[in-house]
Image (cartoon, rainbow, N blue to C red):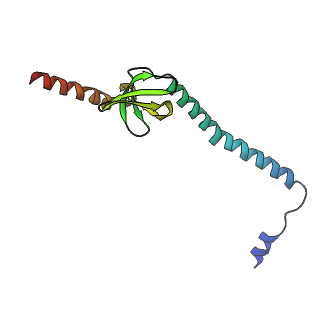
Amino acid sequence: MNTLSIFLQAPAAGGNSSMMLIMMGVMFVGFYFLMIRPQMRKQKQEKNFQETLKVGTRVVLTSGLHGRIAQVQDDGFVIETLSGKLKFEKAAVSREFTEARFGDKAKAAEKTPEKKEIETEKK
């Protein structure tokens, strides 16, 4: 019962209001540097990435579709896949599928279609 009365006591008036404002300011600055600023940087990098894509670049879309950029248009891309050409918005491009980004996986994916073509030519 004694500890309960300690927690229920009202804080002393005076310096607490200025301390409360300082703590609120520190919390806002912390949220800015930990949440808002990194998100803005990520959005800027993603927009820059989507603007710098060129024809012939292998990409992975947000839906998981893999393809090669066949045309760059003002409002989107025409992606060439194994089933044909499809038009997508620029925001649908998730990441680039290149050797620099994926290493051995990209090499294996690049060699697979070539091997199939060589095998069909031999027959």
In the rendered view, does 87 fall on the left or right side of 10? left
Placement of the N terminus among the 4 image quadrants: bottom right
- Counting from the top left corner in percent of width and height, residue 91 is at 50, 33
Determine whether 16 is above or below 89 in the image.
Answer: below
The residue located at (62%, 35%) in the rendering is: 40
What x and y, as percent, mark residue 84? 32, 30
Give me the residue at 80% from left, 71% from top: 8
- Residue 56 vs 43, above or below: the answer is above
Taking 11 as reference, is 101 left or right? left
Q: Locate residue 64: give its quadrant.
A: top left
Left or right, 116 with respect to 109, comes to left
Name the residue located 36 percent from the left edge and 33 percent from the top edge. 66
Asked if 93 appears above or below 16 in the picture, the reply is above
- Looking at the image, the residue that sits furthest to the bottom is 1
- Say which of 71 and 111 sits in front: 71
In terms of depth relative to the viewer, which is nearer, 23 or 105?
105
Q: Residue 6 in the image: x percent, y percent?
A: 79, 71
* Nearer to us in this view, 13 or 69: 69
Q: Position of residue 26 (x, y in %)?
A: 74, 45
View extreme (top): residue:
55
**Residue found farthest to the right:** 14
Please name the residue shown 77% across and 49% down the image.
23
> How many numbered circles does the render carry?
0
Say which quadrant the C terminus sits in.
Answer: top left
Q: Quadrant of residue 104?
A: top left
